[in-house]
Image (spheres, grey):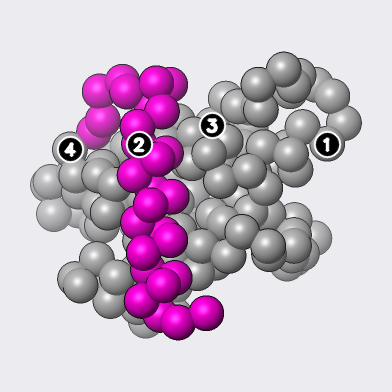
């Protein structure tokens, strides 16, 4: 798929996600459609056909490569009619781009903090929070391929 087409599909996906009623609450500063779209791009290239991958005995799934622990910290969002206690609820949610985006949104809403220590809440903080988690988001990130893809996306 061409880069332009992939970018346009990502833009449409993110716009649709942000237009959903359950995402209309107040967003932290800098939490924008472009921010979540570039997090998606950096995580998986927004590849909706990506299977779960396992790394260090942790399974990461969906366009944002979410783990079960991240999903739980996000409040266990589920697809309409699903139950978070049902086996497979995590996988069903994070493999659906809208449910996965809801999980990321809820995680960012819950844990938003100044990860890069510049005294300003911004998308740069949220991308670090998403990648490292709340407890480790201050770690260096600038040399990681994930962050380089994110920076390229956010600056375009």
Q: Residues within 10 Å of mark 2 (few under 14, many from 20)?
A: some
Q: Secondary structure at mark 2?
A: helix
| Residue occupied by mark 2 | 18
| Label whose residue precedes the other's in the sequence (4 or 3) | 4
Residue 88 bears which disc, if any? 1
Reply above or below: 69 against 106.
Answer: below
Residue situated in front as seen by the camera: 5 or 60: 5
Residue 74 bears which disc, if any? 3
Q: Give the overall secondary structure of the magenta segment.
A: helix
Q: Residues within 10 Å of mark 4 (few under 14, many from 20)?
A: few
**Picture quarter with the C terminus:** bottom left
- Residue range corresponding to the magenta coloring: 1-28
Q: How far is disc 3 from disc 1 in space, using C-alphas?
A: 16 Å
Q: Position of residue 28 (x, y in %)?
A: 24, 33
Q: Residues within 10 Å of mark 3 (few under 14, many from 20)?
A: some
Q: How far is disc 2 from disc 4 in space, using C-alphas?
A: 15 Å
Q: Position of residue 103 (x, y in %)?
A: 53, 36
Q: How far is disc 1 from disc 4 in space, using C-alphas?
A: 33 Å
Q: Secondary structure at mark 4?
A: loop
* Residue at screen point 50% across, 69% down: 45
| Label whose residue precedes the other's in the sequence (2 or 4) | 2
Residue 50 picture quarter? bottom right
| Label whose residue precedes the other's in the sequence (1 or 2) | 2
Q: How far is disc 1 from disc 2 in space, using C-alphas?
A: 25 Å
Q: How far is disc 4 from disc 3 in space, using C-alphas?
A: 19 Å
113 drawn magenta: no
Reply above or below: 10 against 99.
Answer: below
Residue situated in front as seen by the camera: 42 or 130: 42
| Residue occupied by mark 4 | 29
């Amino acid at each position: 798929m061409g880069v332009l087409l992939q970018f346009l599909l990502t833009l449409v996906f993110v716009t649709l996600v942000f237009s959903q009623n359950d995402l209309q609450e107040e967003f932290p500063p800098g939490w924008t459609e472009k921010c979540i779209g570039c997090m998606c791009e950096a995580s998986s290239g927004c590849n909706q056909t990506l299977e779960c991958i396992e790394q260090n005995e942790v399974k990461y799934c969906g366009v944002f490569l979410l783990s079960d622990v991240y999903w739980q910290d996000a409040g266990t969002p589920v697809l309409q009619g699903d139950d978070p206690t049902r086996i497979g609820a995590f996988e069903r949610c994070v493999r659906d781009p809208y449910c996965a985006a809801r999980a990321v949104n809820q995680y960012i809403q819950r844990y938003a903090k100044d990860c890069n220590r510049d005294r300003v809440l911004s998308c740069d903080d949220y991308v670090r929070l998403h990648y490292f988690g709340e407890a480790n988001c201050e770690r260096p990130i600038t040399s990681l391929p994930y962050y380089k893809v994110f920076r390229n996306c956010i600056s375009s």
